[in-house]
Image (cartoon, rainbow, N blue to C red):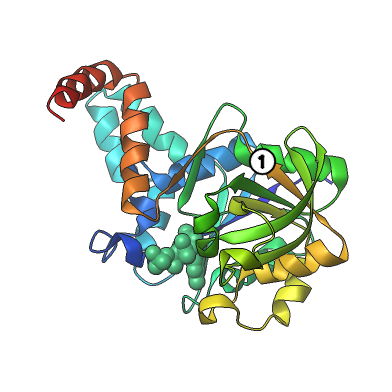
Amino acid sequence: MKITKAVIPAAGLGTRVLPATKAMPKEMLTIVDKPAIQYIVEEAVASGITDICIILSRGKGVVEDHFDASPELEQKLEASGKTEVLETVRAISKLANITYVRQPAPLGLGHAVNCAKSFVGKDPFAVLYGDDVIMGDYPCCKQLVDQYEKYGLGCVCMKEVPFEQVTRYSSLKVDHLENNVYKVTDMVEKPATPELAFSNFSILGRCVLPGEIFDILADLPRGAGGEYQLTDAMKILATTQGMIGVDFVGTRYDMGNKLGIMQASVETALKHPEIGEGFRAYLKELAKSL
Ligand code: UTP
């Protein structure tokens, strides 16, 4: 079955990036000239997604404004002959059919995804975490969609993290299938000690799930940190029917922490057609004094 729907949870508080995120959602923090969430929506669209549900919370209406048409701005740009930027602005509101659902309280990723239940219905769908920007020629979400189409099982993006850090992420029990593709048979969210981890493969930023996940989420107890953890729901899928893990190709930037935000900005600026050259020269000069 073709996957055309995606959910982007973007309702978290972003406490690790305060004070920037006091009034501005972390998903709207810019990487050179686009907010993080636009890179994520573009990745979804490049993966064949046509319908997107963004999960928001109080104070995050600016996300809706960003993907909406902006008649006054467009008229002004048209009148002043700024056609290139006008096209850029117009294209944003035509990227996909985007709907918004509010998560009433930040009760965790599992709870956020469950808020999209009526949007998704019974179809398989992709989840792209709103603060994980993944760049690369082969869109990360497409890597999962392709494996879902091949194996017919829920899929997660994964990467190896340093063993001592696995307690901050999730840990996957995996068997190698082919190339960068693994069978996932169990998982644990934030293992209390590294010894309790299955491996140092952690889920990062993306998954594709069957509609049955909502039956699991409906009965899910609170997990690590008192939150409804999506990993706990996926664990049930992994242990009953198995899931697929894709050691994805691409560069991931964690927009939920300050270092990740700076890495995304610097590396994207270096490749940017307009400012890349100037920024490289500046950085080289600056590096001499470091
Ligand atoms: P995080 O756990 O990284 O986001 O969730 P957070 O809770 O905002 O982070 P900190 O710890 O306070 O800094 C990953 C993604 O899931 C969304 C977040 O907005 C982020 O894009 N999320 C998280 C929700 O939509 N709802 C939640 O209840 C939790």
Q: Nearer the viewer, residue 145 or 81?
A: 145
Q: Nearer the viewer, residue 219 or 234?
A: 234
| Quarter holding residue 20 | bottom left
Q: Nearer the viewer, residue 75 or 100?
A: 100
| Dot 1 amino acid type | Asp
Quadrant where the C terminus sits is top left
- Look at the picture and state if 194 lies above or below 4: below
Query: How busy is the neighbourhood of tag 1: few (under 14 within 10 Å), some, or many (20 plus)?
Result: many
Asked whether residue 212 is in view, the answer is no
**Circle 1 residue:** 247
Secondary structure under the numbered disc 1 in the rendered image: strand
Asked whether residue 72 is in view, the answer is yes
Q: Nearer the viewer, residue 199 or 265?
A: 199
* Residue 113 picture location, percent across and down: 61, 66
* Residue 188 picture location, percent across and down: 66, 67
281 with respect to 256 (left or right): left
136 with respect to 89 (left or right): right
- Look at the picture and state if 138 lies above or below 187: above
Q: Residue at x 28, y 44 (%)?
A: 72
Q: Residue at x 78, y 70 (%)?
A: 236
- Look at the picture and state if 189 lies above or below 290: below
* Residue 115 picture location, percent across and down: 60, 71
Q: Residue at x 40, y 28 (%)?
A: 87
Q: Residue at x 50, y 57 (%)?
A: 164
* Residue 127 picture location, percent across and down: 62, 55
